[in-house]
Amino acid sequence: MRIVLATHNRHKVEEMRAILADSSDDLTDRFEILSLEDFPEIGEIIEDGATLEENARKKARTVFEKTLLVSLADDTGLEVDSLGGRPGVYSARYSGKGASYLKNNQKLLKELSGVPTSKRSATFRCVISIIGDNIDEIAVGEVKGKIGSEMRGENGFGYDPLFIPDGYEITYAEIGSKIKNRISHRSLALEQAKTILRQLVS
Ligand code: IMP
Protein backbone atom coordinates (compact mmCIF):
# COMPACT_ATOMS: atom_id res chain seq x y z
CA MET A 1 0.00 0.00 0.00
CA ARG A 2 1.21 3.50 -0.81
CA ILE A 3 0.84 6.30 1.73
CA VAL A 4 1.68 10.00 1.35
CA LEU A 5 3.25 12.19 4.02
CA ALA A 6 1.32 15.41 3.37
CA THR A 7 4.06 17.95 3.99
CA HIS A 8 6.61 20.03 2.10
CA ASN A 9 8.78 20.28 5.23
CA ARG A 10 11.83 18.10 4.52
CA HIS A 11 12.73 17.93 8.24
CA LYS A 12 9.33 16.47 9.03
CA VAL A 13 9.58 14.00 6.13
CA GLU A 14 13.02 12.86 7.34
CA GLU A 15 11.80 12.39 10.92
CA MET A 16 8.59 10.64 9.91
CA ARG A 17 10.39 8.28 7.54
CA ALA A 18 12.97 7.41 10.21
CA ILE A 19 10.31 6.80 12.85
CA LEU A 20 8.12 4.72 10.52
CA ALA A 21 11.14 2.67 9.42
CA ASP A 22 12.14 1.94 13.02
CA SER A 23 9.40 -0.60 13.46
CA SER A 24 9.73 -4.01 15.05
CA ASP A 25 7.23 -5.44 12.57
CA ASP A 26 8.76 -3.94 9.44
CA LEU A 27 5.94 -1.56 8.65
CA THR A 28 7.96 -0.19 5.76
CA ASP A 29 7.83 -3.63 4.07
CA ARG A 30 4.11 -3.20 3.69
CA PHE A 31 4.00 0.51 2.88
CA GLU A 32 5.65 2.54 0.19
CA ILE A 33 6.07 5.94 1.82
CA LEU A 34 5.74 8.92 -0.53
CA SER A 35 5.82 12.62 0.27
CA LEU A 36 4.76 15.83 -1.48
CA GLU A 37 8.13 15.78 -3.25
CA ASP A 38 6.55 13.02 -5.33
CA PHE A 39 3.59 15.30 -6.11
CA PRO A 40 5.13 18.68 -7.04
CA GLU A 41 1.82 19.74 -8.58
CA ILE A 42 0.35 19.96 -5.05
CA GLY A 43 1.37 23.40 -3.84
CA GLU A 44 1.41 24.92 -0.38
CA ILE A 45 -1.74 24.13 1.62
CA ILE A 46 -2.91 27.16 3.63
CA GLU A 47 -3.03 26.36 7.34
CA ASP A 48 -5.91 28.61 8.43
CA GLY A 49 -7.58 26.31 10.97
CA ALA A 50 -8.23 27.40 14.55
CA THR A 51 -6.68 24.22 15.96
CA LEU A 52 -3.83 21.82 15.20
CA GLU A 53 -6.42 19.13 14.46
CA GLU A 54 -8.25 21.31 11.90
CA ASN A 55 -4.97 22.09 10.10
CA ALA A 56 -3.80 18.47 10.12
CA ARG A 57 -7.17 17.27 8.76
CA LYS A 58 -7.22 19.95 6.07
CA LYS A 59 -3.74 18.95 4.84
CA ALA A 60 -4.46 15.21 4.88
CA ARG A 61 -7.87 15.63 3.18
CA THR A 62 -6.50 17.92 0.46
CA VAL A 63 -3.71 15.47 -0.37
CA PHE A 64 -6.03 12.44 -0.25
CA GLU A 65 -8.46 14.15 -2.65
CA LYS A 66 -5.64 14.95 -5.08
CA THR A 67 -3.80 11.60 -4.91
CA LEU A 68 -6.50 9.12 -3.83
CA LEU A 69 -3.83 7.58 -1.59
CA VAL A 70 -3.98 7.29 2.21
CA SER A 71 -2.56 10.60 3.42
CA LEU A 72 -0.94 11.39 6.70
CA ALA A 73 -0.48 15.02 7.83
CA ASP A 74 1.18 16.41 10.94
CA ASP A 75 0.46 19.77 12.55
CA THR A 76 2.56 20.70 15.54
CA GLY A 77 2.50 23.51 18.07
CA LEU A 78 4.63 24.63 20.98
CA GLU A 79 2.43 25.68 23.92
CA VAL A 80 4.24 27.82 26.48
CA ASP A 81 2.42 27.95 29.83
CA SER A 82 3.50 31.43 30.89
CA LEU A 83 2.34 32.76 27.49
CA GLY A 84 -1.14 31.29 27.94
CA GLY A 85 -0.40 28.46 25.47
CA ARG A 86 1.10 30.67 22.75
CA PRO A 87 2.44 30.31 20.11
CA GLY A 88 0.43 27.03 19.82
CA VAL A 89 -1.34 26.74 16.48
CA TYR A 90 0.54 29.88 15.32
CA SER A 91 4.00 28.39 16.01
CA ALA A 92 5.14 28.58 12.37
CA ARG A 93 4.12 32.26 11.99
CA TYR A 94 4.95 33.36 15.54
CA SER A 95 7.35 36.17 14.53
CA GLY A 96 4.98 37.48 11.84
CA LYS A 97 5.53 38.08 8.12
CA GLY A 98 8.81 36.59 6.91
CA ALA A 99 8.98 34.32 9.96
CA SER A 100 11.97 31.96 10.11
CA TYR A 101 13.09 29.37 12.64
CA LEU A 102 15.71 31.84 13.92
CA LYS A 103 13.28 34.77 14.21
CA ASN A 104 10.71 32.58 15.98
CA ASN A 105 13.28 31.39 18.51
CA GLN A 106 14.51 34.94 19.06
CA LYS A 107 10.97 36.20 19.63
CA LEU A 108 10.32 33.40 22.13
CA LEU A 109 13.50 34.24 24.05
CA LYS A 110 12.51 37.91 24.09
CA GLU A 111 8.99 37.20 25.36
CA LEU A 112 10.42 34.99 28.10
CA SER A 113 13.28 37.27 29.10
CA GLY A 114 13.37 37.58 32.88
CA VAL A 115 11.02 34.59 33.32
CA PRO A 116 12.65 32.13 35.78
CA THR A 117 13.30 28.48 34.88
CA SER A 118 10.45 27.33 37.13
CA LYS A 119 7.99 29.31 34.97
CA ARG A 120 9.34 28.31 31.54
CA SER A 121 7.33 25.09 31.19
CA ALA A 122 5.96 24.20 27.75
CA THR A 123 4.38 21.36 25.81
CA PHE A 124 5.13 20.23 22.26
CA ARG A 125 1.90 18.89 20.78
CA CYS A 126 1.74 16.97 17.52
CA VAL A 127 -1.55 16.04 15.87
CA ILE A 128 -1.53 13.59 12.97
CA SER A 129 -4.51 13.13 10.69
CA ILE A 130 -4.81 9.98 8.59
CA ILE A 131 -7.34 10.18 5.78
CA GLY A 132 -8.10 7.59 3.12
CA ASP A 133 -11.00 5.92 1.38
CA ASN A 134 -12.58 4.46 4.51
CA ILE A 135 -10.42 6.05 7.13
CA ASP A 136 -10.43 9.33 9.02
CA GLU A 137 -8.36 9.05 12.19
CA ILE A 138 -6.42 11.31 14.54
CA ALA A 139 -3.28 10.49 16.55
CA VAL A 140 -1.82 12.84 19.16
CA GLY A 141 1.59 13.01 20.85
CA GLU A 142 2.60 15.39 23.64
CA VAL A 143 5.93 16.02 25.34
CA LYS A 144 6.33 18.32 28.32
CA GLY A 145 9.48 20.26 28.95
CA LYS A 146 10.83 23.75 29.36
CA ILE A 147 12.19 26.60 27.25
CA GLY A 148 15.94 27.18 27.65
CA SER A 149 17.48 30.62 28.19
CA GLU A 150 19.58 30.47 25.00
CA MET A 151 19.59 28.53 21.73
CA ARG A 152 21.72 25.39 22.03
CA GLY A 153 22.53 22.55 19.61
CA GLU A 154 22.82 22.07 15.88
CA ASN A 155 20.41 19.21 15.13
CA GLY A 156 16.74 19.19 14.23
CA PHE A 157 14.72 22.23 13.20
CA GLY A 158 12.20 24.81 14.39
CA TYR A 159 12.20 25.32 18.15
CA ASP A 160 14.52 22.35 18.81
CA PRO A 161 17.41 24.58 20.06
CA LEU A 162 15.15 25.96 22.82
CA PHE A 163 13.09 22.95 23.91
CA ILE A 164 14.43 20.89 26.83
CA PRO A 165 12.24 17.78 27.29
CA ASP A 166 11.45 16.71 30.87
CA GLY A 167 14.02 14.21 32.14
CA TYR A 168 16.85 15.87 30.17
CA GLU A 169 19.09 18.88 30.72
CA ILE A 170 19.81 19.36 27.02
CA THR A 171 17.68 20.59 24.13
CA TYR A 172 16.14 18.50 21.35
CA ALA A 173 18.80 20.04 19.08
CA GLU A 174 21.58 18.73 21.37
CA ILE A 175 20.02 15.30 21.94
CA GLY A 176 20.38 14.38 18.26
CA SER A 177 17.97 12.75 15.85
CA LYS A 178 18.25 9.15 17.12
CA ILE A 179 17.04 9.96 20.62
CA LYS A 180 14.71 12.76 19.52
CA ASN A 181 12.96 10.31 17.20
CA ARG A 182 12.48 7.88 20.10
CA ILE A 183 11.04 10.35 22.63
CA SER A 184 9.51 13.23 20.66
CA HIS A 185 5.91 14.46 20.36
CA ARG A 186 6.06 13.35 16.71
CA SER A 187 7.25 9.83 17.54
CA LEU A 188 4.51 9.41 20.19
CA ALA A 189 1.85 10.46 17.67
CA LEU A 190 3.38 8.24 14.98
CA GLU A 191 3.34 5.20 17.29
CA GLN A 192 -0.46 5.57 17.43
CA ALA A 193 -0.55 6.21 13.69
CA LYS A 194 1.39 2.98 13.10
CA THR A 195 -1.25 1.00 15.00
CA ILE A 196 -3.93 2.53 12.76
CA LEU A 197 -1.88 1.77 9.61
CA ARG A 198 -1.28 -1.85 10.70
CA GLN A 199 -5.05 -2.33 11.09
CA LEU A 200 -5.49 -0.94 7.61
CA VAL A 201 -3.38 -3.67 5.99
CA SER A 202 -4.32 -6.55 8.30
P1 IMP B 1 3.79 23.09 11.47
O1 IMP B 1 3.30 21.83 12.08
O2 IMP B 1 4.56 22.84 10.21
O3 IMP B 1 2.71 24.11 11.33
O4 IMP B 1 4.89 23.65 12.45
C1 IMP B 1 4.67 24.67 13.38
C2 IMP B 1 5.97 25.23 13.87
O5 IMP B 1 6.50 24.37 14.85
C3 IMP B 1 7.04 25.44 12.81
O6 IMP B 1 7.73 26.62 13.08
C4 IMP B 1 7.94 24.27 13.01
O7 IMP B 1 9.23 24.56 12.68
C5 IMP B 1 7.81 23.99 14.49
N1 IMP B 1 7.98 22.58 14.73
C6 IMP B 1 7.21 21.57 14.27
N2 IMP B 1 7.72 20.39 14.68
C7 IMP B 1 8.82 20.67 15.40
C8 IMP B 1 9.79 19.87 16.06
O8 IMP B 1 9.76 18.63 16.07
N3 IMP B 1 10.77 20.54 16.70
C9 IMP B 1 10.86 21.90 16.72
N4 IMP B 1 10.00 22.69 16.11
C10 IMP B 1 8.98 22.08 15.44
Image (spheres, grey):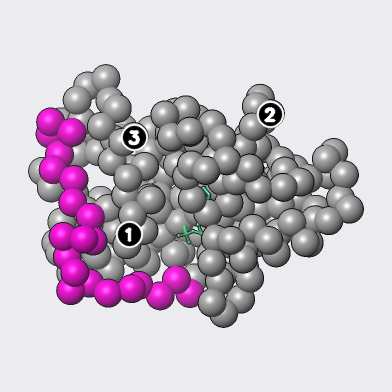
The tag earlier along the polypeptide, 2 or 1, is 1
Is ligand 1 within 8 Å of the beta carbon of the residue shown at mark 1?
A: yes
Question: What residue lies at 19% left-to-right and 69% top-to-bottom?
Answer: 40
Span of residues in magenta: 28-48
Q: Pinpoint residue 122: horizontal percent, then vertical percent.
A: 69, 45
Q: Disc 3, disc 2: CB below 8 Å?
A: no
Which residue is at 76% across, 50% downward?
81
Q: Is residue 39 above or below residue 85?
A: below
The earlier-in-sequence mark between 3 and 2 is 3
The residue that mark 3 highlights is 19
The residue at which mark 1 appears reads as 7
Q: Is residue 46 above or below residue 8?
A: below
**Is 189 displayed left or right of 81 in the figure?**
left
Q: Quadrant of the N terminus?
A: top left
What is the three-letter code of the residue carrying label 1? Answer: Thr
Q: Please give the residue where the numbered disc 2 appears in the rendered image.
A: 169
Query: 10 Å neighbourhood of mark 1: few (<14), some, or many (≥20)?
Result: many
- In which image quadrant can residue 60 be found? bottom left
Gap in Å between the C-alphas at discs 3 and 2? 23 Å
Mark 1 and mark 3: span between their CA atoms? Answer: 16 Å
